[in-house]
Image (tube, rainbow, N blue to C red):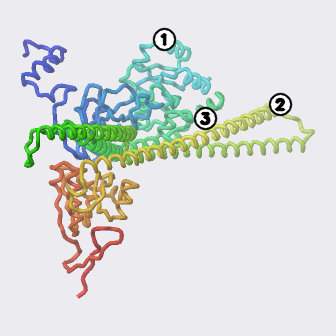
Amino acid sequence: MRRRFPDPLAPGYRDWCATEGLLSGRIPQRAIPGQPGEVALIDQIGVTVLGDGPLADRVRRAADASGIPVADDCRYPVVLLCDAHSAAPPHRHVIAVRDEVGGLPDGVSERWLAWPAPGVATDGVATHTVPLPLDDPGARDDPDAARTGLGLGDGPVFVAMADRCEEVIATFAAAFPDREDARLVLLVPEQIARSEGAERLRLTSAADQRVRLITDATRFPLAVDAASWAVSLHPSDHHAAADVHEWLIEVSLRGVPVLTVTGGLAAELLGGDGCVALPADMTDAQRARIVRNLADDDAKADKVGAAARTQLSEALSPAVSGAAVRRRIELAYRGWRAGRALAAATEEDPLRPLLAARHALLRKPDVDVGHRIPMAPALRRGVLRVLNHYDAHLTWVMSSLLDSMERTAAGLVERQDRIAAAGAGLDADLLRADIDLVAERNAQLGRQIAATGEEVARLRGEVADGVRTVGDFAALVRKNPTRPVDPGTGDQVRALTEALEAGQARIAALEERLTRELADRDARLDLGRWSADQALKATDALRRVVVRQHERVESADAVEVPSSLVLCDAGLIRLPAQDSVMSAVLSSNGVWEPDIAELVDSLIEPDSVFLDVGAYVGYHSLRVLARLGTSGTVVAVEPDGNAVKLLRHNVSANVAPAVAERLAVVEAAAWDSPAALVGTPRPGVASGSRPKIQKP
């Protein structure tokens, strides 16, 4: 092999591995990149992470912190694809994890983005932003050493990406027209250095010796450590949002304060305390004055940098990322199980009995069969002729009836299929998660509006102070009309007047912007409510379709207990027919005791034992079994015999046999001490009772 393939990284060796080596059995299936082997699917909550690289490593860290079982093969229903070269076998819920929106392979059910992306994905794939942990590089130790290494001197240093250099250079030049110790460092990535704008960038920076370009990516961290402020003027819809987010996070985790514009990427990422945001409608002179004042304000820089570092360290910690990944994986697993149950319920053709009955029309009477009463040949022929006529008439009538019944049934099945297709993939938990995201976005808009309102109030106070100052000055002039007027007084009055006019214009612009943001928030809220309402209606229709389809396949008499079928987050479960409490809640909401269910989800871990006292029909036992799989045990305690029958049936119908074996049922009542108990029926519940100590 070494003589045949001296270079193991050459394409020829890779081709041999994927063809001859794989077919001969010398190379295992899982050793071929993008060629996952056939692995037995385990129906339990868990996640498979496929791919290599920094993004895949971050995903694995978040998955490990989530507490959910993690594998490198496709044994679990939920598969995370972290690069473009990996592939997953069929019958999985495939999630593509990417840095930014882009093309996806076939069969992907969902997209996760490590960074917020501008706009909306146009391919119809559900897209969510999931925080992934990052290694904390620690705060910078010695900025002076970094400045010495780059030869930047002791003055203020501003660092920015070179993709919006014209605006940054103009602001820097206006802020420091005569200050020679100020420096502006522009980081030029490789894709910009090779573009047509690189030469224009060099000509623009050559006009000012204080502007320095760094094209060596290995020196970017040194420039960040040397910075007094990092500058980001990127708008929220910037085309390279992922790269900008990565750079901003790197800068903020080093404790470098960020200077940005209101509504930009940095303002949305770091919030009001983690950066200094300049209003977008501010004049160039006002922006230059603020930058000039911030250059030597070390206390402000340290405060902003520390706030940004603390915020990002908490938001991108493994614990927070693990909780977010666990939530999304649980929702994906429930959606996969709901889709699998719907596919299983619709596998058998409901028209099969009707089509089988049509064959009865093809049966011909046997005229040669003997009879106990002898009959003359002529009379026999006459009777057979009459019977044949009558048989043809009945055949025509029954054929017409069967045709009409078949068309009616086919129309009903087609209508149900359309309803199912319209609601396929919907799940109440997924919809609630999307509603939570909408609410979080509205809360963020509310905070931005509140900050804008505070800015308006502050400007009103400044204008009022300016008006009082002008009034006092005018009163002083009127009081001393004969006093010689200082030549600079007119300039001061004009400056105050211009400042007042600029403040009033800024207030008007902010009030107009506040009105637009309020209208935009109300429109988004109305649209989100309408979308959620329509989605919940579709989910209810899908729930009814699934229940009807399952009722056709499985008879209620099979469990020997009068019962009704309900679709909920635990699966398709049967409850006693006379149940008027739990059945009503599950039919309308799909969940039972959500606070307790969430608490149980947060406490259970692999290889643990869950004790369900008063299990009834096994709602909580079934949910925990689905999450633990074969890595844990559930003990259900229930004294009522009918409830125990329904519990066993629900478990066998909703989980794999290997998982169902992890259930132990104790058909008895539980108490905190040995005692004789007596049960009284619980109101509204057909099975079960409320135990109490029997009095002697």
Give the amino acid at mark 1.
Glu
Residue at the disc numbered 3: 279
Q: Check disc 1: other Cα within 10 Å, few if <14, some if 14-19, many if 20+.
A: few
Disc 3 is placed on an element classified as loop
Q: Nearer the viewer, residue 472 or 461?
A: 461
Disc 2 is placed on an element classified as helix
Distance of label 1 from label 2 (alpha carbons)? 49 Å
Question: Between disc 3 and disc 2, whose residue precedes?
Answer: 3
Residue 245 spot, x, y in % from top left = 43, 32
The quadrant in which residue 437 appears is top left
Residue at the disc numbered 2: 487
- Residue 607 placement, left or right of 216: left
Which one is closest to the eye, mark 3 or mark 2? 3
Question: Between disc 3 and disc 1, whose residue precedes?
Answer: 1
The answer to whether residue 655 shows anywhere in this view is yes
Residue at the disc numbered 1: 199
The quadrant in which residue 649 appears is bottom left
Residue 326 spot, x, y in % from top left = 32, 46
Which one is closest to the eye, mark 3 or mark 1? 3
Number of marks in the image? Answer: 3
Distance of label 3 from label 1 (alpha carbons)? 31 Å
Circles 3, 2 touching at the beta carbon (< 8 Å): no
The relative height of residue 100 versus residue 500 in the rendered view (above or below) is above
Circles 1, 2 touching at the beta carbon (< 8 Å): no
- Residue 363 placement, left or right of 104: left
The relative height of residue 102 versus residue 527 in the rendered view (above or below) is above
Instruction: Write the residue at 43% across / 15% down.
Output: 193
Q: Nearer the viewer, residue 456 or 116?
A: 116
Which one is closest to the eye, mark 1 or mark 2? 1
Give the amino acid at mark 2.
Pro
